[in-house]
Image (cartoon, grey):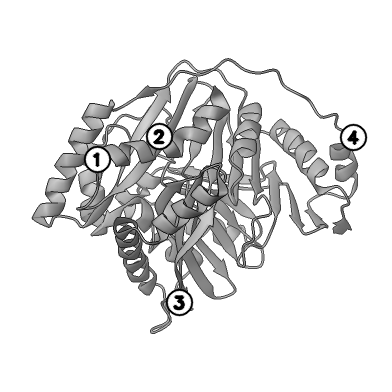
Amino acid sequence: MKIQVTDIESFKQKALQWAPAYDTCCYLDSHSFIDPYGKYDLLIAVGTKAALKVNSGSAFEQLEAFRQTHTGWVLGFFGYDLKNETENLSSANTDGLGFPDLYFFVPEIVITIKGDELSIEGADEHILQTIQRLPLVVEKQQKPVNFTPRFNKQEYVATVEHIKRHITRGDIYVTNFCQEFYADKAIIDPLFTYRQLKDISPTPFSTFFKWQGNYILSASPERFLAKRDNKLLSQPIKGTARRDSNPIMDQILVEQLRNHPKELQENVMIVDLVRNDLTRSAIEGTVHAEELYAIQSFAQVHQMVSTVACDKRHDISDINAIKNTFPMGSMTGAPKVSAMQLMEKYERSKRGVYSGALGYFAPDGDFDFNVIIRTLLYNSTKNYLSFHVGSAITYHADAEKEYEECLLKAKAILQALS
């Protein structure tokens, strides 16, 4: 069912208020970013007809069977520690959240918006009246949350120097070193917090995801992997610069990012890694970089984004295409397995959902998954609240500048909670 909507923004606000009344919901908002590969400006899925919740071991195999049974809408996430299933790896670091490695659900109702056209599946037009009749609730300001870092600045800098010695020896070329900030007695209003986050940092892969009292509140700017017809595409982000309120200075920062040797080196190494990953699923000769070193500007930062694409082989299922590229190169490093092994050694907490991917499989065969970064994770039963930030470490990395980059990436999350 397709309906014209006149006041999209008002509907989106009320729909965001309506969706969390269900035990399971997924709200994906592109914030109208210009995206040649985007299918929807907004996607909302609520209710649960069926669900799959598993940990690493046979998770991809179980999802394959689940997807064959449920060929319509399926939404959910892949946790980073599925790396232990794709490679001979393990995870033994601290995990305060206790989220599964994989969770997907078949929704009862799906609402999508593209332009001014709204589509509904699983309900009739009366659901729109229910949403539009909702009064907008203005929440009171919640108490600030005090986070504890797993590393202080001195420990972080010392660890980066250890990692750089591995690079000097040739163990790895580049890696993504991440740290957790956590609060273990946190009480927040997830909906209010997400609204704050999306207002401060609107991004093309923004997400409010809820299941069984657990929440993923994301301001992700990055696409992990999408399928459009038979085309696979990945858009790794590597390269970050702050924004400036002065337009002239802001443009200078863009040009500095565009020409910075370390940022270009980071980006091209990850592009090569993604090209290699896609080769495992591609028709021979079709893997190519559609765009290199593009600059995308967001509210908090400028980012360097490249686009890598290929035509998918017909004997490779969608699930296997994801498995063949997971975890995403922008969050691991190169060589991929060595970088993941070393980060398991030097990081002090399990990444869990962070560095994973969240998104949808659509009835028409397309899919789209983000990279779970710039994201708050909340277990409301344990009152455990967490976010990770990371940066790429190369031979030329300055440890103190990498620490400052981590804080820059954390800025929107801290503002949303302070």
Tell me, yes or no, if residue 376 can be seen here. no
Left or right placement of residue 234 versus residue 361 in this view: left
Q: Nearer the viewer, mark 2 or mark 3?
A: 2
The tag on residue 407 is 2
Real-space Cα separation, disc 3 to disc 1, in angstroms: 45 Å
Residue, disc 3? 315
Looking at the image, do the residues carrying marks 2 and 3 touch, with CB atoms under 8 Å apart? no
Measured as percent of width and height from the top left, residue 138 is found at 76, 24
Give, as a three-letter code, the residue at label 4.
Answer: Arg
Q: Can you tell which quarter of the image residue 219 is in? A: top right
Real-space Cα separation, disc 1 to disc 4, in angstroms: 53 Å
| Disc nearer the start of the sequence (1/4) | 4
Tell me, yes or no, if residue 227 can be seen here. yes
Residue, disc 1? 399
Q: Can you tell which quarter of the image residue 87 is in? A: bottom left
Looking at the image, do the residues carrying marks 1 and 4 touch, with CB atoms under 8 Å apart? no
Q: Nearer the viewer, mark 3 or mark 1?
A: 1
| Disc nearer the start of the sequence (3/1) | 3
Measured as percent of width and height from the top left, residue 244 is found at 51, 43
Please tell me how crowded label 3 is: few (under 14), some (14-19), or many (20+) other residues with Cα within 10 Å: few
Measured as percent of width and height from the top left, residue 76 is found at 55, 48
| Disc nearer the start of the sequence (2/3) | 3
